[in-house]
Every structure is written in structure tokens, then in C-alpha cells.
């Protein structure tokens, strides 16, 4: 990739594709994430919608939001407050 382009964004996208994004909430900087459904590179366009839905869920149904976090994030949630 480095021979094909000097564009840092293109190089970073290829690096993300090859090594994975690591953990969003955790300590691993590279490698496959624990996401069971989403692919950050493929689904990046959905992030604004996901964020809006999460804000709405948190505001209207905080007890459900807590259960969703416990189910999908688990113990890694402690890194969100760091």
C-alpha cells in the first residue's frame, strides 16, 4: 500500500482493514473487536443514526439502556468513564 499511495487516509483505511480497529472500550489497540454485529469500516455511515437512537433510549428508558450495555459491552464499560 505504501508503494501505491502517499495518501495517509488511504493507508489508514487499509491498515484498519488488515489489522482491525482494536477495542473501543478496552485496552487492545489492534485486532478484531468484540463487536458481534457491527463492522466499523463497513457501517460508519450508520453511526449518526445509532448515536441518536442510543441517546433516545438512554433518555426515555434508562433501565433498558443499562441492560443493553451490560449485555453487549459487559465489563469493558468501566473504560468509558476513564
Image (cartoon, helix red, strand yellow):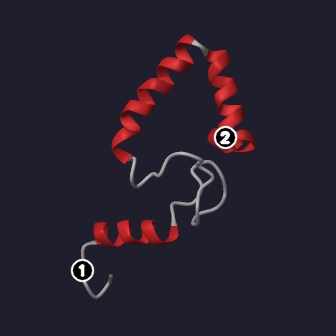
- Where, quadrant-wise, is the C terminus in this rendering? top right
Is residue 67 shown left or right of residue 37?
right
Q: Position of residue 39 (x, y in %)?
A: 47, 52
What label does residue 73 carry, if any?
A: 2
Is residue 29 shown left or right of residue 55?
right
Q: Is residue 37 above or below residue 63?
A: below
Mark 2 to mark 1: distance in Å? 37 Å
Residue extending furthest toward the front: 37
| Mark 1, residue position | 5
Pointer 2 with pointer 1, Cβ within 8 A: no
Is residue 66 shown left or right of residue 49?
right
Is residue 80 shown left or right of residue 2?
right
Dot 2 or dot 1: first in sequence order is 1
Please rate how many residues cluster around mark 2, counting C-alpha atoms within 10 Å: few if below 14, some from 14 to 19, many from 20.
some
- Where, quadrant-wise, is the N terminus in this rendering? bottom left
Q: Position of residue 79 (x, y in %)?
A: 67, 45
Identify which residue, 39 or 55, lies in the foreground: 39
Q: Position of residue 46 (x, y in %)?
A: 37, 39
Residue under the image location 62 percent in, 16 percent down: 62
Q: Position of residue 11 (x, y in %)?
A: 33, 73
Residue under the image location 47 percent in, 72 percent down: 18
Callout 2 secondary element: loop
Amino acid at each position: 500500500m505504501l508503494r501505491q499511495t502517499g495518501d495517509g487516509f488511504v493507508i489508514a483505511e487499509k491498515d484498519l482493514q488488515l489489522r482491525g480497529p482494536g477495542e473501543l472500550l478496552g485496552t487492545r489497540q489492534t485486532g478484531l473487536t468484540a463487536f458481534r454485529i457491527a463492522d466499523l469500516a463497513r457501517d460508519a455511515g450508520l453511526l449518526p443514526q445509532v448515536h441518536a437512537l442510543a441517546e433516545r433510549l438512554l433518555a426515555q428508558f434508562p433501565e433498558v439502556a443499562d441492560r443493553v450495555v451490560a449485555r453487549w459491552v459487559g465489563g469493558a464499560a468501566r473504560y468509558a468513564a476513564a
